[in-house]
Image (cartoon, coloured by chain):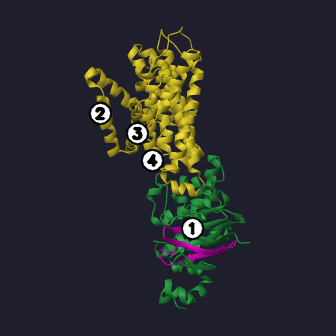
Amino acid sequence: MRVGRLTVAPQVAVLVLILVALVIYPWLFTRSFPVHLMIVIFIYAGVATGWNILGGYAGQVSLGHAVYFGLGAYASTVLSTKWGITPWLGMFVGGAIAVLISLLIGYPCFKLGGRYFSIATLVLGEVMATIFLNWRWVGGAVGVFIPMVEESFLAMQFHSSKIPYYYIALVFLIVSVAINYLVDKSQFGYYLRAIKGDPVAAHSLGINLTKYKLMAMSVSAFLGAIGGTLYGNYVMYIDPTTVMYNTQSTLIMLFAAFGGMGSLFGPTLGTFVLYPMGELTRAYLGGGGRAVNLIIYGALVLIVALYQPGGLVAWFRQLTRKRG
Amino acid sequence: MALLELSGLTKRFGGLVACNEVNLFVDEGEIVGLIGPNGAGKTTLFNCTTGYYRPDGGTITFEGQNITGWPPDKVSHRGLARTFQVVRTFKEMTVLENVMIGSYCRVASTEDARKEALRVLEFTGLLGKKDALGAGLTVADKKRLEMARALATKPRLIMLDEAMAGLTQREVAEAIVMVKAIRDQGITVFLVEHVMEAIMPISDRVIVLNYGEKIAEGTPAEVCANEEVVKAYLGEDYRA
């Protein structure tokens, strides 16, 4: 494609168009729900993109990513409600705690190999949720309400409009995808793909398996925690069932797998398709339809797994190749 | 001083002694062949040397440094590369990317890794297939890619585990040319092989293992004349 005297790759042009569309979206769809939907999608897509670095690139399937999401949400919320520390700082404290926990669980489990790692993350999810359900100091099963304060960027509270949240969440998604892009193009990304492809061969070619898996896990956990902080501050109420449950872990993984594991835009695409579908079924089926969205997700992921394991992204690629 | 020296190398699996007090050395610039019947302990010896198994006894010395018990990635950085008997191609990567994984061992930038990989692909004759996926290659090309990947780590010594098994006669001939070319680049070659037509003409020295023990060592002609080797492995046809 040519723009003036500049030659632009079609992919870049499409990307810029999508970005422009996302930036003007809240001015076109001014009602509350469409903006809300996108905020949650951005956050989940950013977290799923982080999951993808570990699960999609390195092939280490984490079934407990809600732990990092929850740690981010709790750390910033507790810091701000108890000591008045801005969530912008709490976010990074949450990130640091998430990285620490991920290293503690990763170091022994990575020595065992893929399946054991997945099982361990599943157990970690259950254990952490149980701890937070019973930990009175952080609200226990009741959870924590974030007290309303005057609207300000510093407090990350905006009551008159959702638009500031919208842009914060969008920036988070862009940063997450940008990090994934840098990983994809670097030695780090190549090494992760090698580890996923054949760890024995990777080891013989000079790759320290544990080191690179831990690095992937840290990045992944960190992005999960940042997403958690943003989510907690947006909904202003957190409890273990909304930010640290297996349901969230499963969602994060499904979004990434549905869109395309190990691809740059797969998790984002997966979230954009799957999440609204879940919201719609909830809207149509009302209170009686709880968890129906999960059934639909499950069926869709099953179809993808059977017919196109590469996810939506791989399917798109196939279509464009046939035509082009 | 030998480039690689194993002394008293022992590896047991339960009651089975796969390698029993094996002593051997490989000098710089040599092509050394390791032969023996199935189950003689050849691959076990390779696995111990490259860090995949921790030996139960003995030491492995590389360029004068004791590397016994080092993990494979450290061994590789030290300058000792290997290939696998059953090829371990990164199936979802292109040929070029496969080799880049190897060249990243010495350089961190993707640009440099690509340059080095292209150089190795040209040397190994795979340049024309650089964009093909690993999964789509023929057995011969996969074996060649395995060598290219190992070479990209810039080793001093390359250990080839049955790089010619399953190849046609013509492909074996090409592989022999390849091995010689590797040596001419100044890289020492230590290879396990079952294809006698391949190992005999190229090896400077041949070492024979049987039941985990070294039973003979010498030039190909000497080994072929050895009674014990003929009985254990080569068969009457090879009697000199």
Callout 1 touching callout 3 (CB < 8 Å): no
Q: How far is disc 4 from disc 1 in space, using C-alphas?
A: 28 Å
- Report the span colored magenta: B12-41
Residue toward you, B187 or A7: B187
Q: In the rendered image, which quarter is residue A126 located in?
A: top left
Q: Is residue A55 left or right of residue A190?
A: left
Q: Position of residue A275 (x, y in %)?
A: 37, 28
Q: Name the residue that disc number 3 marks.
A: A257
Residue toward you, A129 or A20: A129
Rate crowding at label 4 as few (under 14), some (14 to 19) or many (20 or more) other CA atoms within 10 Å.
some
In the rendering, which numbered label is found on residue B46?
A: 1
Colour for chain B in the figure: green
Callout 3 touching callout 4 (CB < 8 Å): no
Q: Is residue B38 magenta?
A: yes
Image chain in yellow: A
Dominant SS of magenta comes to: strand
Amino acid type at image mark 2: Ile
Q: Secondary structure at mark 1?
A: helix
Amino acid type at image mark 4: Tyr
A279 versus A268 height, above or below: above
Badge 4: chain ID: A
Q: Secondary structure at mark 4?
A: helix
**Mark 4 or 1: the one toward you:** 4
For the residues tagged 1 and 2, is the chain the same? no
